């Protein structure tokens, strides 16, 4: 899941190269100093972008910008949660659902009539992806609407969604929230850096690829 990759990417970050300057951050997230060889490929490098450009600045209360590079990196990392999202299809209602965009940019894996809600920046990859002609037959099943996290419930009602689905980010009930099994503190930091609140409860449903918190 995305939190595990964030921890691995932290080892490949510029902040990690300056460990002495950021010892407080790495102690907080529980990533030790490792002087041995580090594996830094596609997913680790994407996670490193999120660490350097968003999470570390947020942690030190500096300006944290949700840049295109960060959004692209989150899109890449979100693919690691695809098995969990697919498994969610087995527990979600058949009616329209509202997908809350947060640390994980997702929703196309869900076999439902879907309303995508969240900040404009996080919706851009989905807008770009669904602009392809191959999605034309499905336009009646996909709605993409900008909404602040404090506007999610109102926007979902406007489009007739009966349940919210999110990843790490808290959502109004009724909701299904995919949680990180490990390194959850990193997911919480990322969620807060995006301007949202992380879900504080524990998972009540186990699926093959993760844990789901259910809010009724």
Image (cartoon, grey):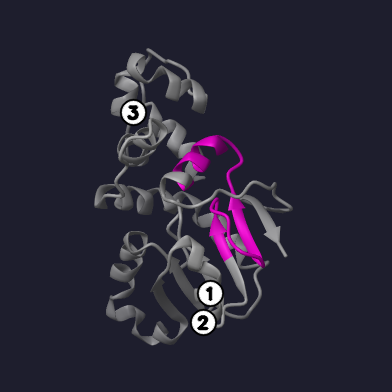
Q: Which residue shows up at 44% across the image and 51% down it?
A: 195
**Numbered disc in front, either 3 or 2:** 2
Mark 1 and mark 3 lie on one chain; the one further toward the N terminus is 3
Note whether 182 is above or below 207 in the view shown.
above
18 sits to left or right of 211: left
* Secondary structure of residue under mark 2: helix
Q: Which of 145 and 178 is in front in this view?
A: 145
Mark 3 and mark 2 lie on one chain; the one further toward the N terminus is 3
Q: How crowded is mark 1: few (under 14 residues within 10 Å), some or many (20 or more)?
A: few
Note whether 91 is above or below 201 in the view shown.
below
Q: Can residue 199 be seen in this view?
A: yes
Note whether 70 is above or below 135 in the view shown.
above
* Secondary structure of residue under mark 1: helix
Labels 2 and 1 touching (C-beta < 8 A): yes
Q: In which quarter of the image is the C terminus?
A: bottom right
Q: Name the residue under label 2.
A: 158
Q: Which of 211 and 201 is in front in this view?
A: 201
* Residue 154, label in figure: 1
Q: In which quarter of the image is residue 173?
A: bottom right
Start-end of magenta stretch: 165-191
Q: Mark 3 points at which residue?
A: 12
User: Distance from label 1 to label 3 (Cα)?
Assistant: 40 Å
User: Distance from label 3 to label 2 (Cα)?
Assistant: 43 Å
Q: How crowded is mark 3: few (under 14 residues within 10 Å), some or many (20 or more)?
A: many
Q: Which residue shows up at 37% across the image and 12% down it?
A: 35
């Amino acid at each position: 899941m995305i939190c595990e990759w964030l921890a691995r990417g932290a080892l490949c970050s510029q902040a990690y190269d300056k460990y002495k300057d950021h010892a407080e951050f790495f102690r907080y997230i529980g990533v030790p100093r490792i002087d041995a060889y580090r594996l830094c490929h596609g997913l680790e490098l994407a996670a490193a972008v999120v660490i350097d450009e968003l999470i570390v600045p947020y942690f030190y209360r500096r300006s944290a910008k949700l840049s295109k590079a960060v959004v692209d990196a989150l899109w890449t990392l979100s693919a690691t949660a695809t098995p969990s999202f697919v498994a969610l299809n087995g527990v979600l209602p058949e009616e329209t659902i509202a997908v809350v965009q947060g640390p994980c940019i997702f929703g196309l894996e869900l076999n439902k009539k879907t309303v995508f809600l969240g900040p404009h920046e996080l919706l851009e990859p989905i807008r770009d992806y669904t602009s392809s002609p191959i999605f034309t037959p499905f336009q009646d099943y996909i709605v993409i609407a900008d909404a602040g996290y404090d506007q999610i419930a109102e926007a979902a009602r406007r489009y007739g969604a009966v349940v919210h689905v999110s990843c790490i980010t808290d959502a109004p009930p009724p909701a299904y929230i995919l949680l990180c099994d490990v390194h959850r503190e990193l997911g919480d930091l990322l969620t807060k850096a995006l301007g949202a609140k992380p879900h504080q409860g524990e998972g009540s449903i186990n699926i093959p690829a993760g844990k789901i918190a259910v809010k009724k």
